[in-house]
Amino acid sequence: MSFRKFSSDTDVIDFARHHSDLFAADEPLQVEEIGDGNINFVYRVSGATNSLIIKQALPYVRIIGEGWPLSQDRVRIEAEALQLEAKHCPDLVPEVYRYDAEQCAIVMEDIGAFENLRIAMVQRIKLPLLAEHLGRFLADTLFYTSDLYLNTYEKKELVKGFINPDLCKISEELFFWDPYCDHERNSINTLIRSDAEQLWQDSALKLEVARLKVKFLNQSEALLHGDLHSGSVFANVSGTKIIDPEFAYVGPAGFDIGSIIGNYLLNIAGQANLSGDKAERSDYQQWLLVGIKTLWHTFEQRFREHMLAETRDPSLQLSEYADWYIAELLADSLGYAGTEVIRRTIGLAHVMDIESIEDAERRADSERLALKLGQILIKERAALDSIDQVIDRVLGELYCR
Amino acid sequence: MSFRKFSSDTDVIDFARHHSDLFAADEPLQVEEIGDGNINFVYRVSGATNSLIIKQALPYVRIIGEGWPLSQDRVRIEAEALQLEAKHCPDLVPEVYRYDAEQCAIVMEDIGAFENLRIAMVQRIKLPLLAEHLGRFLADTLFYTSDLYLNTYEKKELVKGFINPDLCKISEELFFWDPYCDHERNSINTLIRSDAEQLWQDSALKLEVARLKVKFLNQSEALLHGDLHSGSVFANVSGTKIIDPEFAYVGPAGFDIGSIIGNYLLNIAGQANLSGDKAERSDYQQWLLVGIKTLWHTFEQRFREHMLAETRDPSLQLSEYADWYIAELLADSLGYAGTEVIRRTIGLAHVMDIESIEDAERRADSERLALKLGQILIKERAALDSIDQVIDRVLGELYCR
């Protein structure tokens, strides 16, 4: 049977029955399309007590249609990335029950008990385990897919298996080019147009962005999630699930770390002007900053433990190398965080954390703050020696504007 | 017909007749095994007026035997690398007439009119076009296989097509590990044993070597020749041929540039104590230093021209980026030159440029000089701002010892 888009609820239900043993044969099932993304179709199939998710990838971008073709290989990549992540941190990703290559579909665990992190952050919900979970996810997925752990053969097979040009190209353009010129894809609040124009003239900034882009293009350091923004994270008070790694490829480790830190910062910028009590918003900003610290410290400590215990290549066991590597990785992460913050402010895809500020003047204030933070991170990343310094620098911008 | 090692002259001659139209049907042919390498078999097949080369790769290392298996995929890689290089600088590589995947054999142009560069350098032969040719070869092969020229799809296909773990692993160990510890594979003149031991204690050096190793492992910058030492270069007064790219893979561009510069320096170190007139040896050292300068300047000028004219990615067109890139590439190249010099002095595979100094004391003097130059290049590479500064630094070591 060749590929066929699911065309009815019955299609989806039949597929679910044939690809899992979660349901009794005569159990009535319901189906609901829940995809809020722009690219794929996502269905929840529910019986009396159990439910599962089916994600199907079409050969084009969902919201655009056949005019923007997109390789269906992305769903294989997503399935394999989820399975690899599950080897190292099974509690932090949805379990893949089945991957059907023919139908370009993944049947997986329903994570309906968790809330989308972006929405949670806009609502200022404090998730006590979130930062530690993210730090652990990053340390485990990045370490175990790098040359610090794999041998040459394993590593090069991994690179080959996750060649993902269609999805990489999207990031290459949206992160590292569009926001730095007057691109038609950009979406810019007219009130900050002159700020954007100023940024387009900044050669020093553009040089640093070019350097980050080249690392993104050709540094095959570790298997990345590749799209680790708040919308790819689901969480509640007791757990965290990281989904949607269809952008996975072997790239610079700092890109994943920076993407999620950038999303913390976008919410911090948003909280300056979101609706609600000022003290409460300010308190949430503090909580987010502590979160960035916890995330990085959890990551660093765990990653260093892995290096000490499990790096087999003797030339990479040198303690001086570990120190150098972690410092370099922090700088990379800050740089990529900066590119995420900037592209979400003046690029194509904005975020609810700022976009939901209704008053255009107030929104512009948060956007200016975001642009400022982004530029600081990109330009000063090599000079910022510790995460504490980074937090101080952000606080300076928040309180001394 | 499955793979079969050529077992007689008749085998080789039959193969030559079937895989080229160079010879008349009734023309008597002669065959000669000329492989001086350690890995493959190389035959010259000659008729009355024409000749060609057949290189066959066995599934193991020639001098070791079946105890050291080696993927025959290396011969596909060599054939494809030669063909790709020929697209950009056809005059600088032997023409591939045929590649036979089944027999793991390449039928190619006989370059018998050219002399092996290592021998030429030991004999202090000045080759007037050599440095320019090497600079052009490097500029063209590296630029046209990098993200500065290729688009994402082309680049990632190239990475995939040249995954070459068997051969990469050899370099990873011989360049970046063995010489920095008391490894059983090392071969060390007893007179410089204490110098080697000192080097093994030098954490600052080992950190820099680890950084260079990691770039070698995971920076997919451009398609490298991968083994660009003097023995892979053939030259005469009017031309140059670069052969044997079986180590080709997509790696850091500075590795190729550094490998050949390292071989110039090895000869410079050798000339301090090789037999012959002192003034003549000193003159040849000067000629080699000018050669390094010419090589780099030719490379840099041509690479910059390519960037200006042919880099399509707008974010990499920034003039500040070109300056930054070239500076970074010089530093990388110097670092890799240093690793080549050191591994050829105290590692497994030495070079005739130094090894042919019969007197052990005098040989030790050249070896100490080589070790010193290697360490300077590795440790000071970021501070050496121009090739002129590098030359000054080498002259200082030559004359102020």
Image: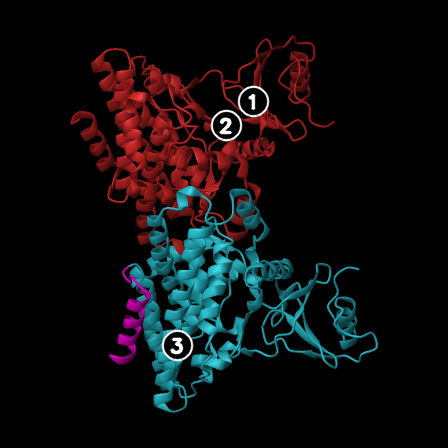
Chain colours: A red, B cyan
Q: Quadrant of the N terminus of chain B?
A: bottom right
Could you tell me which secondary element the residue under label 1 belongs to?
loop
- Which residue is identified by label 3? B288
Q: Left or right: B220 with respect to B290? A: right
Same-subunit check for callouts 2 and 1: yes
- Badge 2 density bin: few <14, some 14–19, many ≥20, Cα 10 Å: many
How much space separates mark 3 and mark 1, taking CA atoms? 61 Å
* Image location of residue B314, percent across then percent down: 42, 42
Magenta-drawn segment: B383-401
* Image location of residue B385, percent across then percent down: 29, 61
- Which residue is identified by label 1? A62
Could you tell me which secondary element the residue under label 3 belongs to?
helix
Q: What residue type is labelled 2?
A: Asp
Could you tell me which secondary element the residue under label 2 belongs to?
loop
In the picture, the disc for residue A244 is 2
Q: Is residue B181 visible?
A: no
Q: Residue at x 54, y 40 (%)?
A: A162
Q: Which amino acid does label 3 sit on?
A: Leu
Chain letter of mark 1 equals A
- Badge 3 density bin: few <14, some 14–19, many ≥20, Cα 10 Å: many
Same-subunit check for callouts 3 and 2: no
The rendered magenta stretch, by its main secondary structure, is classed as: helix
